[in-house]
Amino acid sequence: MSTSITPGRPDGGRDYRQFLPLVQGATLIEWTGTGLFLAVSTIYFVKVAHLSTSSVGIGLTIGGAIAVLAALPIARLAGRFGPKSVLIGVMLLRALATVGYLWVDGWWSFLLIVALIAVTEQSSPPLVQAYVGARSPESLRAKVMAVQRTVVNLGISLGGLIAGVALGSGSPGAFRPLLIGGAVAYVIVAVVFATARDGGTPGPVGATGVRDLLKDRRLLGFTAYNALVSLWMPVLNVAFPLWLVTATEVPERYVGILYAVNTVLCIALQYPLNRCYNTTTRAWISYATAAALLSCGALAFAAAPGFGAHGALLTLGGAVALLTFAELLQVGASWTLSFALAPEGARSAYLVLFNTSRTVANRVAGPVLMTGVVLALGRAGWIALAGVLLLGAVVPLAVLRRTRRAGTAGPSERANARRARTRH
């Protein structure tokens, strides 16, 4: 007879040690497949699919918006059938969409594929988070997710290196094995999860209504706030390289070098920093710190053009380092607080909806904000962004103050308090 596994109980602790290597192996395969095409996708759209850069940008933005709208039905499915079943379907659909790039022959077919990719890319991380979190002890979730994200970065880096070697010939035909390789990776991940032995039921699963999600003001407010602090993504991916090229004397080749600095720091520090956000109180403090670091990073970007090539490079390097530490703290804090916010029986649905904040920041509002406001206004735009982010750093402190006044504490704090009382 199978035994139900409740997060945080000893039986879940025994199970997760056998379970994690399988999930981490699947994660490495998934994100290596993603990395095969991630770094060269824009080149493929322009040189092989023969789309203009503006039409690619519009298509990616619309695809991101569709992914946000699709979060509610995906959340409904996850709430009804559980994260594992929906994750398998998402991976198979992602594989089909990846192969579909080979038949893109115009903007409308491009939009269809981009939308499918956006929906599946958005859905996968929270489903994995829900599945892993349900089978990991509560006290170890921050560590487990830190390892997961380290594996994600390793996979992206490995896929990017393979893509760089494959495209060294400059032949348009080199994209085909990359796309097929990515699709195969997603199929393998689906098979891994489909054949994985469940050591019990990872928490109760019940139908979660869309109205229930939309009526939860804490969920919606936290999702909106996370979108704000997640602006490190469009800053790093959109604003930073364009600012370096157009506003400073730093050679273009340093864009890749500074990206590498970000990747290496993420791989090296995500796990060691897990103690900074392994309780809800620490997670809120990490959010405040992340917003403040982003604000300082924006000011550094504003200052960079005022120096020569060497000084600007050092300033931009400092800005990227600030962004990286903000990224590490924001991502880690989001794991702890999203788990604490979500009711156990509806965790998958809550996490799927919460994850739309990253899509809004990275795909929908973020690129437009960076190109249409921050870069358009130049230094004034960076300073305005720094001001908004600095105000955002106050929000977690206000939440903590309100929580302490109300005399409430998160699950981790209550557990610590019980252990302390037991000792005395």
Image (cartoon, rainbow, N blue to C red):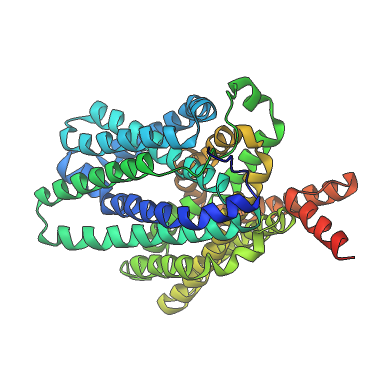
The single residue placed furthest to the front in the displayed view is: 1
Instruction: Name above or below for residue 246 compared with residue 345.
Output: below
The image shows residue 113 at horizontal and vertical percentages of 28, 32
* Residue 204: quarter of image: top right
Instruction: Name above or below for residue 334 compared with residue 351.
Output: below
The image shows residue 5 at horizontal and vertical percentages of 59, 43
Q: Is 309 left, or right, of 421 in this rendering?
A: left
User: Is residue 81 in sight in this rendering?
Assistant: yes
Image point 11% across, 57% down: which residue?
Answer: 170
How many numbered dots are placed on residues in this image? 0
Q: Nearer the viewer, residue 182 or 84?
A: 84
The image shows residue 227 at horizontal and vertical percentages of 57, 43
Q: Is 113 left, or right, of 248 in this rendering?
A: left
- Quarter placement of the C terminus: bottom right
* Residue 380: quarter of image: bottom right
User: Is residue 302 in sight in this rendering?
Assistant: no
Q: Is 420 left, or right, of 233 in this rendering?
A: right
Q: Nearer the viewer, residue 376 or 206?
A: 206
Instruction: Name above or below for residue 189 compared with residue 352.
Output: below
Image point 29% across, 28% down: which residue?
Answer: 112
Image point 43% across, 74% down: which residue?
Answer: 313
The image shows residue 13 at horizontal and vertical percentages of 59, 55
The single residue placed furthest to the bottom in the displayed view is: 310
